[in-house]
Image (tube, grey):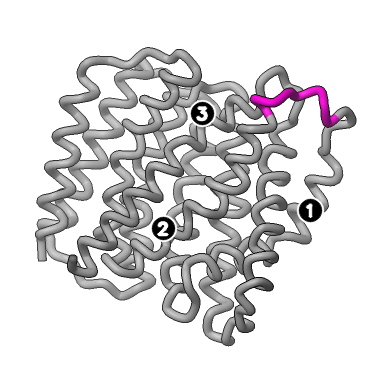
Amino acid sequence: MTPQSSGLLLGLIGVLIFSLTMPMTRIAMTGDVLSPWFVWAGRAVLAALAGVVYLLVTRARWPERRAWIPLLGATVGIVFGWPLLNTIALQTVPASHAAVVNGILPLATAVIGAWLNRESLSRAFWACAVAGTLLVCGYAWQRAHGNLHAEDALMLVSVLLGGLGYASGAIATRYLTGPQAISWALILGLPGTLAVAWWSAPTQPAAPGIAVWGAFVYLGLMSQWIGFFFWYRGLALGGIARVSQVQLLQLFFTLGFAALLLGEAIEPAMTVVALLTVALIAVGRRAR
C-alpha cells in the first residue's frame, strides 16, 4: 500500500471516530447536568492526563524547539477553539444542523495546510475540494431548512480554528509521532482547561448517569485523543490537503450516528450525495 493510500485509510478511521463527537456532545449535555464548559474543559483534561501517562510510559523525549510552534497551533485550534465553540453552539442546535457549518472544515484544513506546509496542488484538486464542500454544505443547509442560527457564527470561527489545529498538528508530526503531538498539544492547554474544569465541575458527580458520563469519556479519550493518532498520521502520510478531503464524509457518518443515538431523521437523498462526495474525493486524490 502506498503512503497516500495508507494516509487515506488512517484518515478515514480518524473521521469515523470524530463523527461521533457531536452526538456524544449532545448526550453529555442531556438534562443540563454537565455544563458545556465542563464538557469541553473536562474532556480536554481527561485526554491530557491520558497523554501524560502515554508519554511517561513510552519515555518520549522532550519536543525539539521547532516543534513547539505547530504544537501551539494545534492547542489553539483543537484543544480550545473547535471543541469549545461547537460545544457552546450544540446547547441549542441539533447535531445534524451543526454539521452544516462544519461541512467546510475539510476545505479550511486543505487551504491552511497547503499554505503552512507549502504544498503545491493542481487546479483540478481545488475544483474538486470546493465542489465537494459546496455539495456537502448545500445538502446539509437544505436539510436544516435554510434556518440561520446565531450559533452559526461561533461554528464558522470554530471551523477556521479547527483547520488551523489539524494542519498544525500534522506539521508537528514531522518531529513527533501522532500520539506524541496530540498529547503535547493537550498538555500545553492543561493549565487553562484544568482551571475551567475545576470551576465548572458538577457538585453531584453521580447525578449525570451512566449514559452522560459514557459520552463524556468517549469525548475525552476518543474524540480528543485517540482519534488524532490516526488523523495526524494519515495527514502526514498522504498530504494535508488531500487526506483532509476524506473529512467530507464525516457529515454523513455524523447524521447516521445522530439518527441511531438521538433519533434524528435520515433522508434518502443522503446516499446519493454521499456517493457523489466519494467520487469527488477520488478524483481530487488523483489530481496532480
The amino acid beneath tag 3 is Pro
Q: Residue 255 occupies which quadrant of the picture? A: top left
Label 1, label 2: how many angstroms apart (C-alpha)?
Answer: 26 Å
Which residue appears farthest toward the front when viewing the image?
57
Q: Residue 48 occupies which quadrant of the picture? A: bottom right
Magenta range: 205-212
> Residue at image x 32%, y 26%?
140
The amino acid beneath tag 1 is Leu
Local crowd size for mark 3, using a 10 Å CA cut-off: few (<14), some (14–19), many (≥20): many
Label 1, label 3: how many angstroms apart (C-alpha)?
Answer: 24 Å
The amino acid beneath tag 2 is Phe
Q: Secondary structure at mark 2?
A: helix
Q: Is residue 186 above or below residue 144?
A: below
Label ID, residue 40 = none
Q: What residue would you read off at disc 1?
A: 194
Which badge, 1 or 3, comes first in the chain's sequence?
3
Which badge, 1 or 2, comes first in the chain's sequence?
1
Q: What residue would you read off at disc 3?
A: 23
> Residue at image x 24%, y 59%?
242
What percent of the width, then of the height, locates residue 217?
Answer: 64, 40
Q: Is residue 288 above or below residue 268?
A: below
Which badge, 2 or 3, comes first in the chain's sequence?
3
In the picture, the quarter occupied by the C terminus is bottom left
